[in-house]
């Protein structure tokens, strides 16, 4: 799937705490039906074999709606499962190495917490950046907060799009207006919601306001 910046508008990241492996495809489908434009499968401490199995099911679900599936950290699982790409952190396999080993349409996202990291990821071939935590995060309580001015500077320092992440909720999302983000990435706000589909509908409207903020 060819990457387009508007795929970042509402970026939903899965959370194992909120559902079982058997429920994941249904929950992801509800998120997409509500307006999620990209899905990331984030799973820790399970074997590659199981991860490929889960990812393969989600590829079918996501592609049914024309939405890309990204795998967190593990680019090899992404390739084996037929997923559309990978998102890597600062200490994972480098963007440049992954770019050399995958096809030209393989989507690569990279975490950036500084201007230097952002520029390097862009130079190495990343398609987009994930920047945060913009608010305190319940999913990653030890995540380093990034001040709004730094976020704004990072967005201006690169030509590739930026998705904002970290503690974003329906109540605080509009505080991100004017920072230059192409969209928002959320975990528990979506997948812990009583009504995932309606929550995504609400968030899609709010995220579009941020993207189109003048």
Image (cartoon, rainbow, N blue to C red):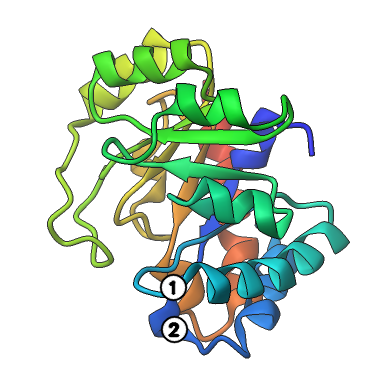
Q: Is 23 displayed left or right of 149 in the figure?
A: right
Kindly state the secondary structure of the residue where label 1 is placed: loop
The quarter of the displayed image where residue 9 is located = top right
Q: Are marks 2 and 1 in contact (CB under 8 Å)?
A: yes
Could you classify mark 1 by the number of other residues whose Cα lies within 10 Å: few (under 14), some (14-19), or many (20 or more)?
Answer: many
Residue in view at x 48 percent, y 51 percent: 74
State how far apart marks 2 and 1 are (Cα).
Answer: 6 Å
Residue in view at x 81 percent, y 66 percent: 60
The image position of residue 37, as x and y in percent, is 68, 50
Q: Which residue is mark 1?
A: 15
Could you classify mark 2 by the number of other residues whose Cα lies within 10 Å: few (under 14), some (14-19), or many (20 or more)?
Answer: some
The image position of residue 23, as x and y in percent, is 62, 88
Q: Can residue 166 be seen here?
A: yes
The image position of residue 180, as x and y in percent, is 44, 23
Q: Which residue is mark 2?
A: 18
Q: Residue furthest right?
A: 64
Q: Is 13 displayed left or right of 156 in the figure?
A: right
């Amino acid at each position: 799937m060819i990457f387009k910046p508007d795929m970042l508008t509402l970026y939903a990241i899965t959370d194992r705490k909120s559902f079982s492996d058997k429920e994941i495809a249904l929950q992801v489908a509800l998120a997409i039906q509500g307006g999620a434009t990209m899905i990331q499968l984030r799973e820790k401490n399970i074997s590659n074999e199981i991860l490929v199995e889960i990812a393969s099911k989600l590829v079918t679900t996501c592609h049914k709606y024309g939405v890309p599936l990204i795998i967190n950290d593990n680019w090899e699982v992404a390739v084996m499962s037929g997923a559309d790409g990978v998102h890597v952190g600062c200490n994972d396999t480098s963007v440049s190495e992954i770019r050399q080993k995958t096809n030209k349409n393989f989507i690569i996202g990279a975490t950036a917490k500084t201007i230097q990291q952002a520029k390097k990821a862009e130079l190495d071939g990343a398609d987009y950046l994930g920047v945060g935590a913009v608010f305190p995060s319940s999913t990653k309580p030890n995540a380093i907060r990034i001040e709004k001015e730094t976020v704004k500077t990072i967005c201006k320092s690169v030509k590739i799009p930026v998705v904002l992440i970290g503690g974003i909720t329906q109540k605080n999302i509009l505080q991100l207006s004017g920072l230059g983000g192409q969209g928002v990435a959320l975990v528990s706000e979506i997948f812990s919601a009583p009504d995932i589909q309606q929550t995504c509908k609400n968030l899609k409207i709010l995220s579009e306001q941020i993207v189109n903020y003048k």
